[in-house]
Image (cartoon, grey):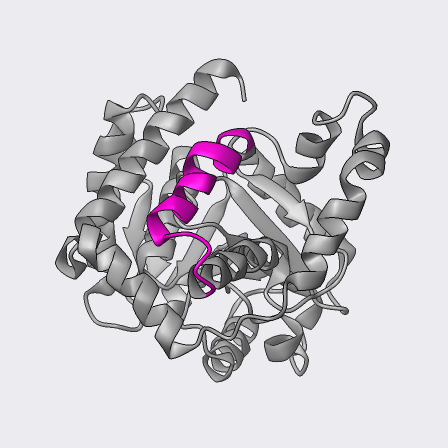
Amino acid sequence: MAERIAVVGAGLIGGAWAIVFARAGHSVRIWDPAPGAAEAALATVAARLGDFAAAGLVAEAPATIAARVAAAPTLEACLEGADHVQENGPERVEVKRETFARLDAIAPAGVVLASSTSGIPASAFTEGLAGRARCLVAHPVNPPSLVPLVELVPAPWTDPAVVARTRALMGAVGQVPVTAMKETKGFVLNRLQAALVAEAFRLVRDGVMSVEDVDACVKDGLGLRWSFMGPFETIDLNAPGGVADYAARFGGLMGSITEEQTPFRYDAETVAKVDGARRAVLERDDIAGRSAWRDRRLMALAAFRKAQGA
């Protein structure tokens, strides 16, 4: 059954969410406090849907999907009749508190209030709300219209039925929801990413390998397997007897490596070294163009996964 989705915040993530819900057949209203931002998002959505159609990633005409997305003149109009709210505001806890206080005051009881925040736990901005039981984090990967994972992170007081309902919605619109059983700093995806990125910086800082070659280790090594299986399945297949056999064979080595991995604090000298290496191959003004190239590669990968039944 089609639902009405309210997208609050019309930036890159908000626009991508509008595509996710609209291509699944839902009606979407999008609002942003910045004048003209919601209207600009509509143009971006229409353009992106053309790219999706060219890649074979949507079943309907782009104009048909785009017609399901409308700009709302006010937050009240955006929330009117909504079944689910997806908030995409600035990553500042005080802004989240103010926004969710307004959402909770305006949205009728029973409407789920979900935040796309990348790392602020729902407990930090919903504790004092009358409707705090309907609030949770639904953290996407940028852009959610191409990378399907969504982390559902409830606060201690979030109603389990709200988590289940949100998980069902995300699955129904083609996303891949995962549920955290408790809040952690940065959630799970960012914690996994932080561990790898920190080690990459340390290897460059300590003169072990160049920036380009560290990238190659992931792009042409780990990333090929990780594009269709996770770390546990990877090690399960890396020893004849599975995970237990892997731990027996390599646990000593891998454990000793982690003992050397001290926290990395993003010191200015190392950051400048890595940034300089990247700017040598990609001018700062070319980042947006390379990001568009990345999205086209993600489209091609999504089309391949779709064809393979992934």
Q: In which quarter of the image is the N terminus?
A: top right
* Picture quadrant where residue 177 is located: top right
Q: Which segment is the magenta one? A: 206-225
- Seen in the picture, residue 202 relative to 90 is either above or below; the reply is above
Residue 222 magenta: yes
Q: Position of residue 174 (x, y in %)?
A: 51, 33
- The answer to whether residue 137 is left or right of residue 227 is right
Q: Which residue is drawn at 63% across and 56% down?
A: 188
Residue 87 magenta: no
Residue 4 visible in rendering = yes
Q: Quadrant of the C terminus?
A: top right
- The answer to whether residue 205 is left or right of residue 42 is right
Q: Where is residue 184 in the image (x, y as percent from the top left)?
A: 68, 66
Q: Residue at x 30, y 39 (%)?
A: 295
Q: Residue at x 53, y 17 (%)?
A: 309
Residue 43 visible in rendering = no
Number of labelled discs? Answer: 0
- The answer to whether residue 111 is left or right of residue 158 is left
- Seen in the picture, residue 282 relative to 295 is either above or below; the reply is below
